[in-house]
Image (tube, rainbow, N blue to C red):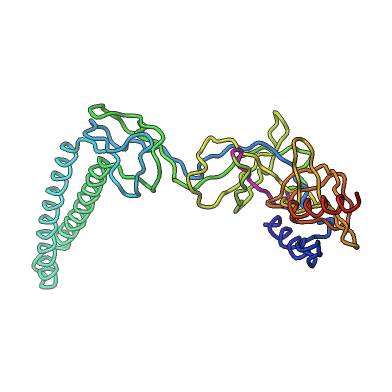
Amino acid sequence: MRVQKIILMLSAGLLPFVSSGSETLQTIRSERISMPLEYRLDGVVEARQQATLSAEVAGKIEEVNFDVDDFVEKGEVVLRIRDLEYRAQQQKARAAVDEAQANLQDAQLEFRRSQDLLKQKLISQAQFDRDRANLKAAQARRASAEANLAQAEEQLAYTVVRAPYSGVVVQRHVEPGESVNPGNPIMTGYALGQLRVSASVPQSIIGSLRQNREARVILLEDEQEVAVTRITIHPFANPQNHSFPIRLDLPQMDDRLYPGMLVKVAVTIGSQRRLLLPQQALVSRSEVNAVYLVDTDGNVSMRQVRPGNRYGEQVEILAGLDENEIVALDPVRAGIEYKRQLDAVR
């Protein structure tokens, strides 16, 4: 991420140690860094892969193996529908295939005999044509019987409902003993960890987002950042509020995020030079924030500053500090040196 690169640049700007009596102070020179200019909006977490399983055949439910919040592995049996009728249809279809196959074999033998007799001119052409037609009809009856068997086996397979992917059950629509028809919802679930964030971008900044194609997702609880693997921008605006819907795909996640949660989305709309310091250099007492400055002679002074947003371990300084000033990284040691210098003056 760009913020991490900036942190490395700041770390590389560390100055040599400055002597302070028996202690040493590590310092850094303040400088302005080109940072992404971001616009923050609200986003909602949603599942990238979510589906509602529906009944494919009619029947009475014999068992339901999972409930809400259960994790289901791909291919596991979610539900079973009573299959007695469908097994009977399968057996009937299989018997029809056997019968059609036997009739086809008889028709093939009869046709071969007709071929030999026709060569010997012992039967008429009309008789041969009838035997050939009977063979074709027997072949068609076998094909039809095989199609009916395949359909019966498919209907039987539909009585066992399996999970299409690994995920978590979010809604259960049926109970054992209920009767269902084709199309009735059975269970709803989403793929665990495969999440995305939906947000709406104002018309005024959509051009900048299309140009930069950069965004961050920020958790509300601890301000931690989540990487974005892909940004999808809708090609047209919502006519009600004139904003553009966007989707931000997230990497495989742990249990920090769930569908329906609210997050912040920071989209990059340009760049801006910001004065950044490591958070460790900032001294915070009550509502006062300050830093310790070190001049070229090793003198330490304290100056009040106004901090802004944090970027990882760095904090933006909005006022009270200029570029190229030397700041102590260890406020405790700097405070001791500052007090020692004051005492020496007195």
Q: Quadrant of residue 223?
A: top right
Q: Residue placed at 61% from the left, 52% from the top?
A: 227
State the residue lying farthest toward the top: 178
- Front residue of 251 and 185: 251
Q: Residue placed at 82% from the left, 53% from the top?
A: 340
Check if residue 37 falls in the magenta segment.
no
Q: Whole-percent x and y of residue 46? A: 53, 39
- Above or below — where is 278 with respect to 57? below
Would residue 73 appear left or right of 155 to someone viewing this image? right
Q: Which residues are magenta?
A: 210-221
Would residue 114 appear left or right of 155 to someone viewing this image? left
Q: Whole-percent x and y of residue 198? A: 60, 40
- Front residue of 13 and 341: 341
Q: Residue placed at 54% from the left, 52% from the top?
A: 251
Would residue 14 appear left or right of 181 to someone viewing this image? right
State the residue lying farthest toward the bottom: 120
In the rendered image, which quarter contains the N terminus?
Answer: bottom right
Q: Whole-percent x and y of residue 215? A: 68, 49
- Above or below — where is 100 with respect to 286? below
Tally of numbered tags? 0
Q: Whole-percent x and y of residue 190? A: 44, 41
- Front residue of 306 and 204: 306
- Front residue of 157 and 138: 157
